[in-house]
Image: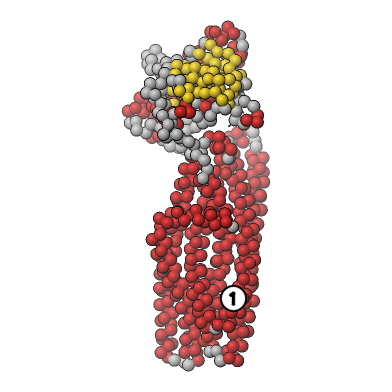
Amino acid sequence: MRKDFNILKRLVPYILPYKKRLILAMISMAIVSVLTGLLAYVVKPLINNIFITKSYEDLLLIPILVMAIFVVKNIFYYAEFYYIGNVGQNIIRTLRDEVYSAIVKFPVPKLNKIPTGVLIARITYDINIIQRTVSDSVSAVMKDILTILVLIVVVFYMDFYLAVVVFVLFPVVIIPVTLLGKKARKTSTDTQTEMGNITKFLDETISSLRTVKAYNMEELEISRFKKLSDNLYRFLMRMTKIRGLTVPFVELIGGVSVSLIIFVGGLQVIKFGYTPGNFFSFLTAILLLYEPVKSLSRLNNSLQEGIAAGTRIFEIIDGESEKMGAHQRSLPEEISSLEIRNLYFSYDKSKGYDLKNINIKALKGKTIAIVGYSGAGKSTISMLIPRFYDPDSGEILVNGINIREFNLKDLRNSISYVSQQVILFNESIRFNIAYGSFSKDMKDIIKASEFAFAHDFIMKLPNGYDTIVDEAGLRLSGGEKQRILIARAFLKNAPIIVLDEATSSLDSESEKEIQGALFGTDENPYGLCQNKIAIIIAHRLSTVKRADTIYVLDNGEIVESGNHEELIEVNGIYKNLLIKQMGN
Ligand SMILES: Nc1ncnc2c1ncn2[C@@H]1O[C@H](COP(=O)(O)OP(=O)(O)OP(=O)(O)O)[C@@H](O)[C@H]1O
Ligand SMILES: [Mg+2]
């Protein structure tokens, strides 16, 4: 309960900027509520003066009054609806942006722990729930409570004793409804988890539909999806039951109450001289009470669901973000060396080290290659340099200074990191190349692309540099994508290159062009690695041959090092890797 309250309290700062609109909404609500009460009140003169006294004057006056009440009431109904909707949408927009920003700033190890689908569900599903709670329910709270209060005044004014009878019945309605609300919250959490599972499943399978088809696994995927879908169906049905039960419950109790009112009220008219106008006005007020009470009871469920969603969303917003160390020192102007010293690292401490006693030294103008079997730990090393992870012990030094001492933004600015996954953003080619260097102009982009041997094929695309990567029909080849990423690295022109080559073997033409892009050609000696500190995780012989020092990684340890010729002499893993490659 206290926790619930805290979640609601946390929403307050999101609401405050829209105070004015909220006040306008509340004024509109107040007018709507009072007019609703007035409507019930008018029934008394209607019955007494028209039906009993038969006054012609009132026969004209009362319908006009009723009409006027309806017109004004609905004008303010619109105002209230608009302002509350507006405040609600604004709150949601802020929350949505904050959740996304929190996710983007998550440290990599934490991102690994939460499935993508779950994170996406936070932004889509949970935010939607909060939206419903905020804009429907918060408005309902204020309007309904106000309306109820006004109607209660009318009720007590018309017939005090009868009113007492009715309000003794009231808690009988409220208690079971609260219990249903609790159940609704639990079910909402379950539904949310299931929704996350489905999003994750969809993300995985739709993006690898080609594999699914290649292995004739369509039916398997359909049945796997059906299982998840059935689960979700069960939770949603449970939700439907709870929601559905709430209304009949309230209505049933309402029906019993009305019968009681007819009996007690009729008795008072017959025996104690109350006018029929009093009675019908009372009854109208009670009937008008039904709607706001009903929506208030629905509100409880919605509030419970909203609190559950809010808890999950604030968990993300409050989550630890990557420490950028903004106050820490900048990197030296001139970067001349990068050294990995006695480094140990494990993804999961209980499972032993993934990297053991790594020592690598890279100097400006030299190219380092790291090779080894799949799973040896090559990509892991590449990810430690931009500090996606930090080592358990040992250090990584730039110009002899531990990289932890630099501010992270600066460190990453000094590295052109090309990951093993060749993934482009679904934006223009120009956007993809300029990513991270948006201040550079088109001339630089073209120059970088020329160096990367990408300009020619880009010009052949339907819209050249403005071609959208995923545009229908356009699929870039693996080598072409890699060259776009190399162009990006060229444009960034960072002093440290960390390139995790994609495993895909290339045809000899692309191979030659990529080598040219990395190390230069006879005609154009300017290559990406020239005059830089270059660490290349190499999967291709042609890359390795050009490296000044090659480190062979096996099972997280460096087992051989030297240049190409020296390592062939050693006759170990390196030679074995080469033989395998040539066999291909
Ligand atoms: N996020 C992670 N969490 C836990 N373990 C991981 C993670 N990423 C990689 N590993 C493990 O660390 C080890 C090294 O993986 P790494 O990706 O560095 O290999 P690699 O040498 O780059 O292989 P490849 O040549 O196939 O790219 C593997 O045993 C792998 O299972
Ligand atoms: Mg790898």
Q: Looking at the image, which residue is at 61% across and 44% down?
A: 197
Q: Is residue 512 visible?
A: no
Q: Horizontally, is 556 left or right of 48 in the view?
A: right
Q: Quadrant of the C terminus?
A: top right
Q: Looking at the image, which residue is at 51% across and 69% down?
A: 145
The number of numbered discs placed on residues in the rendered structure image is 1
Residue 80 pos. (x, y %): 43, 65
Q: Is residue 177 above or below residue 359?
A: below
Q: Quadrant of the N terminus?
A: bottom right
Residue 210 pos. (x, y %): 58, 35
Q: Looking at the image, which residue is at 51% across and 65% down?
A: 141
User: What residue is shown with label 1?
Assistant: 167
Mark 1 secondary-structure assignment? helix
Residue 155 pos. (x, y %): 53, 79
| Residue in the foreground of this view, choosing between 497 and 63 | 497
Mark 1 is on which residue type?
Phe
Q: Looking at the image, which residue is at 64% across and 58% down?
A: 183
Residue 4 pos. (x, y %): 56, 56
At label 1, counting other C-alpha atoms closer than 10 Å, the crowd grade (few under 14, some 14-19, many 20 or more) is: few
Indicate the colouring scheme.
Answer: secondary structure
Specify the quadrant of the image occupied by residue 218. top right
Q: Is residue 112 above or below residue 282?
A: above
